[in-house]
Amino acid sequence: GAVVSQHPSRVICKSGTSVKIECRSLDFQATTMFWYRQFPKQSLMLMATSNEGSKATYEQGVEKDKFLINHASLTLSTLTVTSAHPEDSSFYICSARDRVNEQFFGPGTRLTVL
Amino acid sequence: GNSVTQMEGPVTLSEEAFLTINCTYTATGYPSLFWYVQYPGEGLQLLLKATKADDKGSNKGFEATYRKETTSFHLEKGSVQVSDSAVYFCALRGNYGQNFVFGPGTRLSVLP
């Protein structure tokens, strides 16, 4: 089946630094990629939707200048958390949709900001 | 808008017990329905899905039937194992390829 990978799986950073998370579709081309955020013991909340080669569409309440999304190719999207703070600590999950509209989820990246 | 409601957890069962996790939804049209499982520290894995009314999704002993008349998609398993301990998310996706809407998740703990 289709596989979506994320890198890194875990990252710890200091407050004020920026962190980049990669999401790759390994065996299919992803026309659309999604970024979700999951706080402990809560459900997934959609942060933004990105289409290859165009600007991401952010959900209400998500700061686009803080969470930079780049979807440079049909197999790669990146989420950069800029000037991270402890409240940004969370589990970030990406998802990719293929050309027949099937959607697959990555394994997640746990970000801890000290 | 579309929404998903799940029974609140946590659910604690003994091994080999019968499991039911209720899920109901609100949506226009004919959404596809999904159950995802999340093991500790991991991402979401698709457990099963159903794309139209009366369809039954099944996998690894779990099953759920798409009931349009009751707008439900309850998850069942006849005999749970300790390894089934995880968080289970019910989700829907609109019939026009819309974004996923997830329920709040139900944490299941199975004791030996």
Image (cartoon, grey):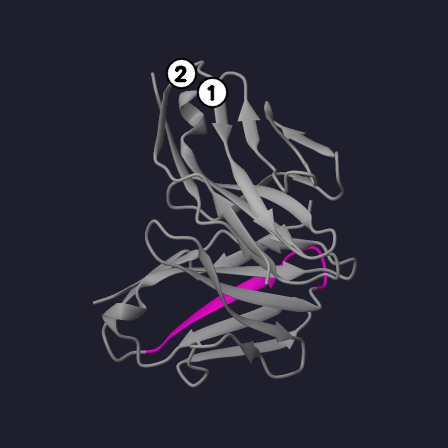
Image coordinates for residue B83, horizontal then vertical, percent = 43, 26
Measuring 51% from the left and 35% from the top, which residue is drawn there? B22
Q: Amino acid at mark 2?
A: Glu
| Image quadrant in which the N terminus of chain A is located | top right
Q: Around disc 1, counting alpha carbons within 10 Å, would you say few (fewer than 14), some (14 to 19), or many (20 or more)?
A: many
Is B55 included in the stretch rendered in magenta? no
Residues at marks 2 and 1 on the same chain: yes
Left or right: A21 as drawn, with respect to B49: left
- Mark 2: secondary structure: loop
Query: Which of the two residues, B76 or A24, is positioned nearer the viewer here?
Result: B76
Q: Name the chain letter of the residue that bears numbered label 2.
A: B
Query: Which of the two residues, B30 or A58, is positioned nearer the viewer here?
Result: B30
Q: Amino acid at mark 1?
A: Val
Which mark, by number, is residue B80? 1
Measuring 45% from the left and 28% from the top, which residue is drawn there? B84
Location of residue B51 with respect to B86 vertically, above or below: below
The residue labelled by disc 2 is: B15
Query: Which of the two residues, A65 or A79, is positioned nearer the viewer here?
Result: A65
Total count of labels: 2
Location of residue A28 with respect to B21 vertically, above or below: below
- Mark 1: secondary structure: loop
Image coordinates for residue A14, horizontal then vertical, percent = 23, 72
Which mark, by number, is residue B48? none
Q: Name the chain letter of the residue that bears numbered label 1.
A: B
Span colored in magenta = A18-29
Location of residue A101 with respect to B103 vertically, above or below: below
Is A24 included in the stretch rendered in magenta? yes
